[in-house]
Amino acid sequence: MILQRRNRILRQSPAIRSMVAETILQPADFIAPLFIDEGENIATEIASMPGYYRRSLDLTVKEVKELWSLGIKCVLIFIKCDDALKDNTGKEAWHKNGLMQRSIKAIKDAIPEIVVMTDVALDPYSSYGHDGIVKNGEIVNDETVEALIKMSNSHAAAGADFVAPSDMMDGRIGAIRNGLEEAGFTRTGIMSYSAKYASCFYGPFRDALDSAPGFGDKKTYQMDPANRLEAIKETLMDIEEGADIVMVKPAMAYLDIIREVKNAVEVPVSAYQVSGEYAMIKAAAKMGWLNEEKAMIESLTSIKRAGADLIASYFTKEAVRLINEK
Ligand code: PBG
């Protein structure tokens, strides 16, 4: 055959392939989610997330130091709230000395340069396991937003670099931004979960924090997986209201949305490879059906290729170790 163009020329050796690779993962791409629990010297493996732990604060600080030493710049923290402290107002969420607030301080004290992001939503603190306040079986929007403002300000006061509202109430980004401004927190960023879908892939996370909804589902606030334009609308509104970074969540089943959002906006785009995505790869690897390392790197590369500037993933530490070895 005489061919004008042989595409395989650019694929013939590892050296050439690495020269023409369009997408390269680096440690600064990652956000490491962390689950924090009360107590001391406790690390509990999450049954549906093999290899992932909920740790007491002392062990969390140790873990964060390790993450930082690997080149990971950012952690996103979630706490498991004691059942006795849960109620329908979610008020433990803005307790000055709550586990979240203590965790932010302890992490920033240990490594001041690391970027601490905090989950802002009422579900871990709600006796109903919903992201908002419940009235007559409904998740009420405006009162929930008032609670989220208090929660965000308390995280900022404790030293959080970014608050990350994951609740999908209407108008919360603008309200949180105003709240931060009024309280003088002019350096606190907002990473908005702007296109967050009502997804079954959050199942293992809800095991980790014991935060599954007690009734119904989250479909009246999180987005319908059938929708694409709505993701753009939500994201553009959040940016107008003051979001510094936007997010698409989950990631792998929504790569088209990541790309469309990336093309539509001028702020950094993050994507969350959620608990169920992690669990699927871990489970298949455990069965010997997938090569775990390869599946991990391929999935993360595809998320970045789709347009994510930042990736929140439970594989962060393992992935960065592999990247650093190369
Ligand atoms: C809380 C929150 C959830 C996740 C992040 N923040 C759960 C939910 O919305 O039900 C999911 C993360 C994951 O599955 O890894 N609002």
Image: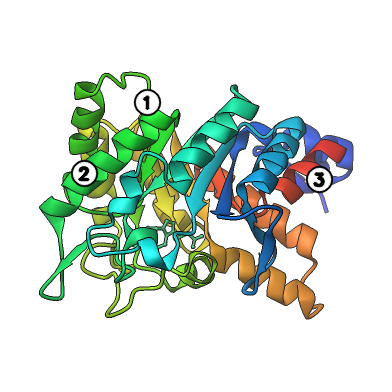
Q: From where the camera sits, is residue 326 visible?
A: no
Give the residue number, with chain letter if any, for mark 2. Answer: 172
Query: Amino acid type of disc 3?
Result: Leu
Q: Residue at x 54, y 66 (%)?
A: 208
Give the residue number, with chain letter if any, for mark 3. Answer: 322
Instruction: Give the class, few, some or many, for how many residues have Cα within 10 Å of label 1's Cα (few <14, many ≥20).
Output: many
Residue 269 placement, left or right of 167 = right
Query: Amino acid type of disc 2?
Result: Arg
Instruction: Give the class, few, some or many, for how many residues have Cα within 10 Å of label 2's Cα (few <14, many ≥20).
Output: many
Q: Looking at the image, is mark 2 or mark 1 earlier in the sequence?
A: 2
Give the residue number, with chain letter if any, for mark 1. Answer: 188
Residue 246, given in percent of the width and then of the height, sits at 37, 40
Q: Looking at the image, is mark 2 or mark 3 earlier in the sequence?
A: 2
Nearer to me, 28 or 179: 179
Q: Give the mark toward the camera: 3 or 1.
A: 1
Nearer to me, 74 or 307: 74
Q: Residue at x 87, y 36 (%)?
A: 15
The image quadrant where one finds ligand 1 is: bottom left
Nearer to me, 290 or 150: 150
Q: Quadrant of the C terminus?
A: top right
